[in-house]
Image (cartoon, rainbow, N blue to C red):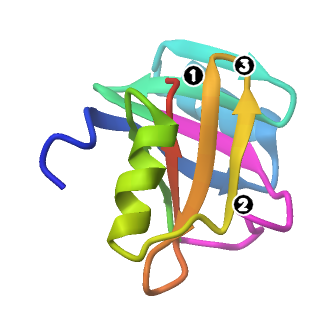
């Protein structure tokens, strides 16, 4: 898949208490806040964009210890077409969102892999 993916977009963690997690990542550790929205926030954790989400019962499950990997592509439509030729189809999406569209894939162990046009 060389050339299909530009770079990582984010790594996501699920938390039970968003305010407490924000105090830890932003206030205690001092990571710069990049996004702060209902249900999630994102920090620059030493060059890795770390997205902290509350459980949604789907992609972000309470008690999960596995991260969600986000991969940025210049065109979701083109990436999904290329992946389809390799037998990989999204479980969810494409889903429009502010700044671009995204789709959810699953790795063989069931971990979420979000392919996204936005950061």
Q: Tell me the chief SS of the magenta region.
A: loop
Report the side of 90 relative to 9 (left or right): right
- The magenta segment: 50-65
Element marked by disc 3: loop
The quadrant where residue 7 appears: top left
Question: Which dot, 3 or 2, sits closer to the camera?
Answer: 3
| Whole-percent x, y for residue 51 in the image | 57, 37
Q: Is residue 63 magenta?
A: yes
Label 3 packing within 10 angstroms: few (<14), some (14-19), many (20+)? few
For label 2, the residue is: 60
Q: Is residue 116 above or below residue 27?
A: below
Left/right placement of residue 107 relative to residue 82 reads: right
Q: Relative to 68, is 29 above or below?
A: above
Q: Secondary structure at mark 1?
A: helix
Which residue is identified by label 1?
26
- Counting residues from the N terminus, which is met first, the one under dot 3 or under dot 2? 2
**Is 16 one of the magenta-colored residues?**
no
Question: In the depicted view, which residue is nearer to us: 57 or 52?
Answer: 57
- Tag in front: 2 or 1: 2
User: Label 3, on which residue?
Assistant: 98
State the residue in front, 27 or 98.
98
Q: CA distance from mark 3 to mark 2?
A: 19 Å
């Amino acid at each position: 898949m060389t050339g299909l993916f530009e770079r990582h977009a984010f790594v996501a963690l699920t938390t039970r208490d968003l305010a407490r997690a924000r105090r830890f990542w932003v206030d205690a550790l001092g990571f710069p806040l990049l996004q702060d929205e209902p249900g999630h926030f994102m920090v620059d954790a030493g060059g890795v964009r770390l997205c902290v989400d509350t459980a949604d019962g789907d992609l972000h499950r309470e008690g999960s210890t596995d991260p969600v990997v986000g991969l940025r592509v210049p065109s979701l439509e083109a990436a999904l077409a290329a992946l389809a030729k390799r037998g990989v189809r999204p479980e969810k999406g494409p889903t429009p969102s502010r700044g671009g569209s995204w789709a959810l894939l699953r790795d063989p162990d069931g971990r979420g892999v979000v392919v996204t046009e936005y950061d």
